[in-house]
Image (cartoon, rainbow, N blue to C red):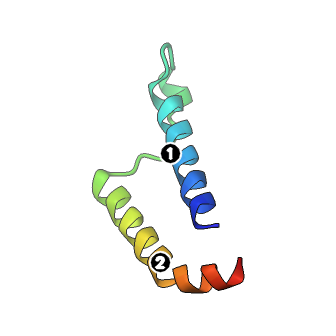
Amino acid sequence: PKWGLAAAVLAVGLSAGYLALRPGAAPEQTASVPDYSEDQLYAALEAFVSFSEENSEWSAEAF
């Protein structure tokens, strides 16, 4: 379950990065990708990691 969440987050990040960086992408196509700053991304990642650590014991019992 924890790995599944991490894989989902990674997949979303990779697909968003691919959409933004793929060759021949027009500006109007990449505009749909949210424009987050690195600070926001790191903050979200830290929050996700701390949340996962806090709930790892519960996850181990639930699955």
Image coords of residue 22 (percent x, y) = 49, 21
Q: Position of residue 29 (x, y in %)?
A: 56, 28
**Nearest to the observer: residue 35 or residue 52:** 52
Instruction: Tell which of 33 and 62 is nearer to you.
Output: 62
Q: Nearer the viewer, mark 1 or mark 2?
A: 2
Residue name at image x 47 percent, y 36 percent = 17
Q: On screen, 43 above or below 17?
A: below
| Residue shown at 60% from the left, 86% from the top | 58
- Looking at the image, residue 12 lies above or below residue 51: above
Front-most of residues 21 and 54: 54
Residue sitting at x 56%, y 37%: 15
Hey, what amino acid is under mark 2? Phe
Q: At numbered mark 2, what does the secondary structure look like: helix, strand or loop?
A: helix
Q: Could you tell me which residue is drawn at 39 percent across and 51 percent down?
A: 36
Q: Residue furthest right?
A: 63
The CA distance from mark 1 to mark 2 is 19 Å
Quarter of the image containing the N terminus? bottom right
Indicate which disc, 1 or 2, sits on the residue closer to the N terminus. Answer: 1
The reply to whether residue 4 is visible in this rendering is yes
**Residues at marks 1 and 2 touching, judged by CB atoms closer than 8 Å:** no
Q: Which residue is mark 2?
A: 51
Tell me where residue 61 sits by quadrant.
bottom right
State which quadrant residue 2 falls in: bottom right
Tell me residue 8's x, y (percent).
60, 53
Q: Furthest-left residue in view?
A: 39
* Location of mark 1 (residue): 13
